[in-house]
Amino acid sequence: MKNLGFFAEFTLSEILRSLCSLRIIMSLYRDTTMYENIVSRLALSSFVIGATSPTQNLILATFGHHELSPHFVGARIAMSFERRSLAKRQLAEEVKGMEVIYERCCGVDVHKKKVVACAIAPEGKEVRTFGTMTEDLLELAGWLKNWRVTHVAMESTGVYWKPIYNLLESEFTLVLGNAQHIKTVPGRKTDVKDAEWIADLLRHGLIRGSFVPERSQRELRELLRYRTSLVQEEAREVNRIQKVLEGANIKLGDVASDVLGASGKAMLEAIVQGVDDPKALADLAKGRLRDKLPALERALHGLIGPHQRMVMQCQLRHLNFLDDEIAGLDKEVARRMDPFEESIQQIDDIPGIATRTAQVILGEIGLDMTRFPTASHLASWAGVSPGNNMSAGKRKSGRTTRGNHWLRSALVQAARGAVRTSGTYLNAQYHRLAARRGDKRAIIAVAHSILVIIYNMLRNKTRYEDMGIEYFDKRDSQAIVRRTIRRFERMGYTVTIAQRQPVFS
């Protein structure tokens, strides 16, 4: 009974509501062990709370006033399938008897070619199936208006929810739920049951909506994400060109830091046109690369075949096409990000963040930080928060959460740039953590710090002030001194400390 103090503070209805919101009730139907464990705890809690509900009366009638244990209760449940079924029905009745938050609501089960909608109102319930063409979705909107629906919930299934959301958002309050949080009961899995279950959860306020920005920001997101995809494709094409050069034993990448820079492109274009003379190719170098002419001549002496010239010609043409498309997207993104210009300049002061990275970050999170209660909520949504998995006092996996892939990638890119900026707080944080935890964990920690800094800057309308590379030394100065003294003493030295002047101002 020592672990039942938690149950004593709540009524059984509150416990059931919490269980339902966490999807544990659904686990009962598919996992006998989980079911036995929960019911045994509820049975034990009935002696603390008092048998005041039908479910508690059922448990007391089933098990009696024995000195119960989970093993005893589990054995009794295993022996009585009828009682277990009755308990499940009773639990369902308890859920249905919870407070109704939205009287007129609808649950929508979304698929590629059809949507199944279940409308619930005080006068009854109706389930209908609609297509996904525009005229079908307009018919869905009219049907919802006839039922005077105010709230509509759906799962975030791939991209199929987006046209429905775009069409209905001006008429109804939409709730986009995480599909993993609102799974239906195995064994009764149909589209109709899915829609009914979503509607029932919405009716009782048990679906937590996902963050869906306004339409203008969603359109900006699509442009930014497509531009990022093109930039990534450009990098892949550069790697393919490098592969062809290596196959022809042209070691341009060993001498030039950027194979596709101004000098490198001129050389590659000449190679495609049939120039084989290494000296003539090296003479196309520009700027500081001309200081490496002897090395360039040796690197450009290769054996390139006609098929390799043809492949490289296609690759360069593709690369030029990508450059043009990215330039066009840059212009459109810059036009749409006029309202963000001040904030871009604001966060551009953070080490590692350039204009493109700032555009991606602001395009994903927006400017209104009140959507996220704390910086920790934002970091978790972005997927740069460490996992929290502890059992029996032992910390297990600390794997980061799955979050916004595009935002996380931009933050990691910014972190990589920030740790190369010496004399900064982020640089000191990286080296402090990388020594103990490794490069990847340290980079994620720096990305987390960058996002927290951005959150506070946007929320409080402040400028970036770097705390400096000495921040951690100032914070732990005494610990650093003690640790250093212990190291010297282990080496056999006697250490006397005398501070001549304050080290840190």
Image (cartoon, rainbow, N blue to C red):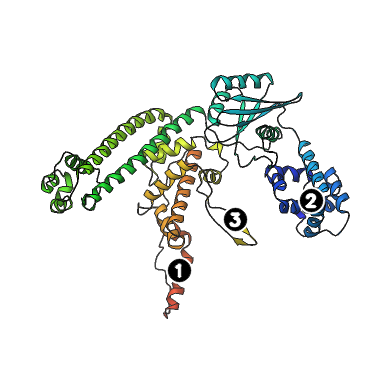
N-terminal label among 2 and 1 = 2
- Residue 466: x and y in percent read 41, 49
Q: Quadrant of residue 196?
A: top right
Closer-to-camera residue (35/409): 35
Q: Which mark is residue 481?
A: 1
How many labels were placed on the picture?
Answer: 3
N-terminal label among 2 and 3 = 2
At a point 54% along the width and 56% down the height, the residue shown is 398
Q: Residue furthest bottom?
A: 492
Q: Is residue 399 left or right of residue 425?
A: right
- Residue 408: x and y in percent read 46, 45
Marks 3 and 1: which is nearer the front?
3
- Residue 211: x and y in percent read 56, 36
Q: Amino acid at mark 2?
A: Leu
Q: Which mark is residue 389?
A: 3
Callout 2: 10 Å neighbours few (<14), some, many (20+)? many
Q: What distance separates the C-alpha of mark 2 from that of mark 3?
A: 25 Å
Closer-to-camera residue (24/489): 24
Q: Is residue 270 above or below residue 435?
A: above
N-terminal label among 3 and 1 = 3
Q: What distance separates the C-alpha of mark 2 from that of mark 1?
A: 54 Å
Mark 3 element type? loop
Q: Quadrant of the C terminus?
A: bottom left
- Residue 90: x and y in percent read 81, 42
Q: What distance separates the C-alpha of mark 3 from that of mark 1?
A: 34 Å
Residue placed under numbered mark 2 in the picture: 42
